[in-house]
Amino acid sequence: MHLHMENLGKRYKGDIWGLRNFSLDLGPGVLGLVGPNGAGKSTLMRMLATVTKPTEGSATWNGTDIARSPNPVRTVLGYLPQDFGVYPHLNAVEFLTYLGAARGIVGRDARRRILQLLELVNLTETRKRPLGSFSGGMKQRVGIAQALLNDPGLLIVDEPTAGLDPEERVRFRGLLAELGGDRIVILSSHVISDIEAAATSIVIVNQGRLVTWAQPEELLRTVEDKVWETTVASSDLTVMKQRYLISNTTRTSEGVRVRVVDDRMPDSGAHRLTPTLEDAYLYALRESRNGVAA
């Protein structure tokens, strides 16, 4: 099981590049894909899901170019796009049965698989309700179920926990971690805690280019001894933000407690903190914007 990307790029009208010179080599595991809005994450996932073709470069699944011969990857693909929609007049069972038939999953096997997945995403009790009556989080769980219908070897999910309550988010994180043991999972999320809980490796994308690709432990080492906490007056906070990378602030009776990510100690009263993946992510983005290799 092997997904290889070589100098992958996508150009849109107006000579705007959504992604460029993107190369990765993936085996089984969970890849966490993070970056600002418009960084190129969805463009990458749409190309890998064969929804759109690259302008340059190539992506291969087990050696087969997915743009030239998409069927081999489509048969093993599970895909949850960010803008997933449902047919409001169908219930969950009918909707998943329809999608299963489109993928060649029919009969008793389809029925058994659908009931298993509805239990997995905690929708068994509401499986006969029209999808139009579902909340946003419930529709998202239907989307997760449809992505898993064919027991995919390649699972691509874009913001899968959007709208999920904390309990469902934790449940889905655990599911992704389990799935990554024997298949390739690509997880895009703005929620760093989701990435931290499930990912075996992390890619940071910015302005259509790969900033860094590393294991979580490697990313954390990039900000070791670079995370500080200090307290400043509210009136000094704006100047502090101009001088330093601030990853968090907390209001207290003594002033504003500031979490700073920087090579330098921000002031004599600062003390070091244990870094988080969010600290490492923000630091890598800043370094890339400054033109420094992350």
Image (cartoon, grey):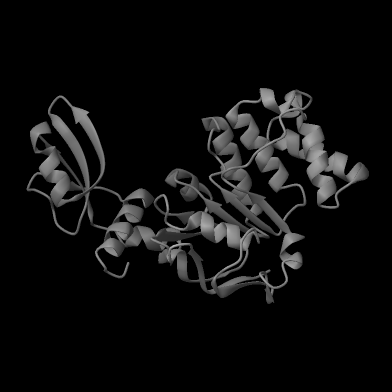
Horizontal side of 110 relative to 150 (left or right) equals right
Q: Nearer the viewer, residue 252 or 6?
A: 6
Vertical position of residue 165 compared to residue 270: above or below: above
Vertical position of residue 113 compared to residue 7: above or below: above
Vertical position of residue 6 compared to residue 235: above or below: below
Vertical position of residue 250 compared to residue 129: above or below: below
Picture coordinates of residue 176, whole percent (x, y):
61, 48
Q: Nearer the viewer, residue 67 or 80?
A: 67
Q: Quadrant of the C terminus?
A: bottom left
Instruction: Specify the quadrant of the image occupied by residue 85.
Output: top right
Q: Residue at horizontal 85%, vertical 49%?
A: 105
Q: Residue at horizontal 66%, vertical 40%?
A: 143
Picture coordinates of residue 21, whole percent (x, y):
46, 73
Horizontal side of 239 relative to 53 (left or right) equals left
Picture coordinates of residue 50, whole percent (x, y):
66, 61
* Residue 54 can be seen in this image: yes
Q: Residue at horizontal 33%, vertical 61%?
A: 221
Horizontal side of 150 relative to 176 (left or right) equals right
Horizontal side of 33 relative to 52 (left or right) equals left
Picture coordinates of residue 254, whole percent (x, y):
12, 28
Instruction: Specify the quadrant of the image occupied by residue 167.
Output: top right
* Residue 270 can be seen in this image: no
Q: Quadrant of the N terminus?
A: bottom right
